[in-house]
Amino acid sequence: MTFSAEPNRPGRPWRSGAFAVVRRGGRGCRAGVAGGLCLAAAVWAAGMPFATRAQETSELITTALPFPEYYPVQDDHYGHRIGKVNMHYGASVATVFTDNRNLTSDNQEADFGVTTSVNLGGFYVINERQKVQLDVGIGYAWWLESNERDGLFITPSSHLDYYFRVGDVQINLANETSTSMNASDRPEYAGGSGNSAQDLAFHEMRNISTASSSYALNRSVSAGGSYSFTLTRSLTEQFQSLDSNRHQFSVGPNWQVSAPVSVGLSGSYQLIQYEQQVQNDGELVSFGGDVSWRARDNLSISLSAGYSQSFYDQTGTIQDNSNFGGPTFSMSIAHEMNKYMRHTLSASRGMEAGFGSNYTDSFNVQYMLNVRMARLSPTLTVNYNNFSQSGSGGESGGLYRITLSNGFQLTRRVNLGAAYNANIRASGDADRDYLENQVTATLLVSF
């Protein structure tokens, strides 16, 4: 669960993660979950669910956050047609090994898991003003040692979108549903030392419903607004204190200065309410702007910056009366060196809703390198997250993540993948350091 602590452009879905799909020809899009595989179709790995998005060749570049941002794909990504509906189908199976399932500093315990999923998608153009898009992935995870983590999951890319126009106003109604099983995606989670640690049974479901609209004032200036409702629920008892309901309102204009440059302003208000009286309820106000610049055909730069202020009520049992106030930003530079290699450097500073505290202040830096070679697609991802929890005695430290992955297109419909993921946590509290090594192998079939 995340407070968005950077300006959010109205008319876009609320964004909390980062995964990137790079298509042939250099058009990048999106953002997502660490520990995944780089396949010729979108796959989720490292103990997470798996999903297929497109029938055409694309590469998945994985990153470090548990809930990926979503951008709609186009109707030509669906390889079948039933009447007027473009469809795609897929199924996957993966094996996962971790040598430190409870993220402890010593006496680590290994675990082995198997996940399977089926995926269905459709794109229907009702008329030139109305479009409907649906993608759903459902699967089951089974773990040898940690039975509490067994169960059904929903892939992070599951969504429903309905686009239509009322006069000159473009309206989008969207719903995204996903589950997350990877506790190492959050810097606050660590199992402690040795036998004193309990099993980490992290299994969280999130549903985001969004209504957004935009209106073109003229050829270069538009204005928009959005409302989103986020419901977060833990599917195990261990993390139910984080169950919450959040409302977010955003508004702001956008100016297309020239073909390669656009500028936007935005303001947002968020209200978060927890189901249990453990965490403190809060509000967050943010305002700022962003700039996107396509400097060359193979070089894109984006920057957003603003100021955020949070206010927390003493509604929970945690002893934290601190509020967040300060500048936030995010930046990204994507460079396609040649037709075989692409790399991206990104950095951000913001705050997330805390676990045992009001919030976690985070500074994140990430580098990704993707190589495309015939049927192979090796990827290197290096991520560093410096975090500090609010409140008296709040923990601070760093979370490092290194991912090496490779996808192999066996046939037009069958893809194989393998990934190695290292999670390293360096904390100011000695018994909350850990090292986790994770290996994943995946088979994906598209129909």
Image: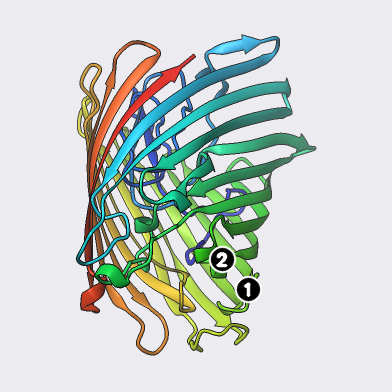
Label 2: which secondary element: helix
At label 2, the amino acid type is: Gln
Count of marks placed on residues:
2
User: Which residue sits at x=43%, y=26%?
Assistant: 92
- In the displayed structure, 39 sits above or below 143; it is above
Is 243 situated left or right of 43 in this image?
right
Residue linked to disc 2:
240
- In the displayed structure, 364 sits above or below 300; it is below
The disc label shown at residue 276, or none: 1
Whichever of labels 2 and 1 marks the residue nearer the N terminus, that label is: 2
Is 385 situated left or right of 228 in this image?
left
Q: Are marks 2 and 1 in contact (CB under 8 Å)?
A: yes
* Res 381 seen here: no
User: Which residue sits at x=57%, y=11%?
Assistant: 80
Is 201 situated left or right of 161 in this image?
left
Locate residue 125: give its quadrant.
top right
Characterize the local packing of mark 2: few (<14), some (14-19) or many (20 or more) Cα atoms within 10 angstroms. some
Label 1: which secondary element: loop
Front position in the image: 294 or 248: 248
What's the coloring here? rainbow
